[in-house]
Image (cartoon, rainbow, N blue to C red):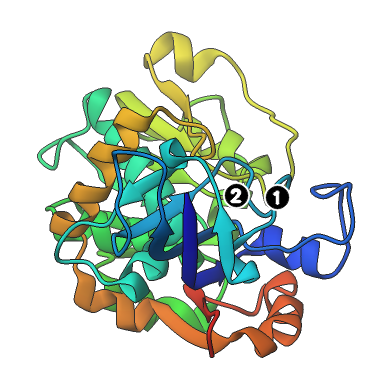
Amino acid sequence: MLVRIAYSDLNYKDGLVVKGLGKLVRSYPHIPGIDFSGTVEASASPKFKPGDHVILTGWRVGEVHWGGYAGRARVKADWLVPLPANMSLRQAMAIGTAGFTAMLAVMSLEEHGLKPENKGEVLVTGADGGVGSIAVALLANVGYRVAAVTGRVDQHDYLRGLGAATIVTRNELETPPKGPLGAERWSGAIDNVGGVILGNLLGSLCYWGSCASVGNAAGIKFEATVIPFLLRGINLLGIDSATCPYEQRMLAWPRLASELPLDKLEEITRVVPLSAVPAEADLILKGQVRGRTVIDVGA
């Protein structure tokens, strides 16, 4: 498949690659961009024809394979998902890997019993980031009461605008509970942070609640006891959006098109030209970017 790329985005991994940090990329030169939306130019697959609008997330594009900032991409047909009819190329990338990951987390939580009528709110950590922002908007739009976690006071109004019913400070979750179990507060959780916060929140999940873990920005070290698992029957669910089955992808994107309030994307998203990537990478690595940063590859 040959795809003409319209939009990519910038996330923390892209920032590391742009600045030559970490070990995500071991061969240079390399073109970052972990996802993209675009138009099929040539197809050797019966699944797609020239002119089709598609999106690609995962498959280590931007890490092992040249990524979305390249302008053109030659990829396998099985890596591409057709865009839902009511979704534009720009909207698709405003959702991107972040929104896709958020949807996978919600689907996994629901498969393990999460329902809007369950006791307790759904906790979202790192709520002012890309995955977190979309998770808050998505959950609130389909009827869940959402508690959004942020360490930034200036983001409270933003998160309430996305639908958060409660704002939880990062300091509150960084403080360890007095015992292995706290009061039942959360019917479920989507954790984008990892580290100490992940270990602490598990003891405050309701009976048979689940936490979908999608990130480790605060570190990969995991400190928790088995008590919440044994005495409350909780589930810790790992979400890998890079290589999840194609069937899940085909379920997730139509749900995003129908359940995510697409009008909220304007509040979550900034669109910048490709030339702005180096400066934007600095900001995202310093934690100064909220929501989604979409790259207009052709601008």
Q: Specify the label residue 181 is tagged with.
A: none
Quarter holding the C terminus is bottom right
Residue ID at (22%, 71%): 262
Report whether 285 appears left or right of 107.
Answer: right
Asked if one can make out residue 293 in the rendered structure from this viewpoint, the answer is yes
Report whether 229 appears left or right of 167.
Answer: right
Mark 2: which amino acid? Val
Q: Classify residue 247 by image quadrant.
A: top left
Whether the residues at callouts 2 and 1 have beta carbons within 8 Å, the answer is yes
Disc 1 crowd rating (10 Å Cα; few below 14, some 14-19, many 20+) is few
Give percent across and percent down for residue 285.
Answer: 74, 70
Q: Classify residue 232 by image quadrant.
A: top left
Which residue is nearer to you in this view: 171 or 59? 59
Please, what secondary structure does the residue beneath circle 2 have?
A: loop
Which residue is nearer to you in this view: 232 or 81? 81
Q: Classify residue 152 by image quadrant.
A: bottom right
Q: CA distance from mark 2 to mark 1?
A: 5 Å
Residue ID at (43%, 47%): 101
Report whether 158 appears left or right of 280.
Answer: left
Give percent across and percent down for residue 21.
Answer: 88, 60
Asked if one can make out residue 167 in the rendered structure from this viewpoint, the answer is no
Please, what secondary structure does the residue beneath circle 1 have?
A: loop
Residue ID at (46%, 79%): 155
Which of the two discs, 2 and 1, labels the residue nearer the N terminus?
2
Residue beneath label 2, please?
193
Residue beneath label 1, please?
218
Is residue 1 placed above or below 50 in the rendered structure? above
Marks counted in the figure total 2
Give percent across and percent down for residue 207.
Answer: 30, 22
Is residue 106 placed above or below 25 in the rendered structure? above
Which residue is nearer to you in this view: 146 or 269? 269
Give percent across and percent down for residue 259.
Answer: 16, 56
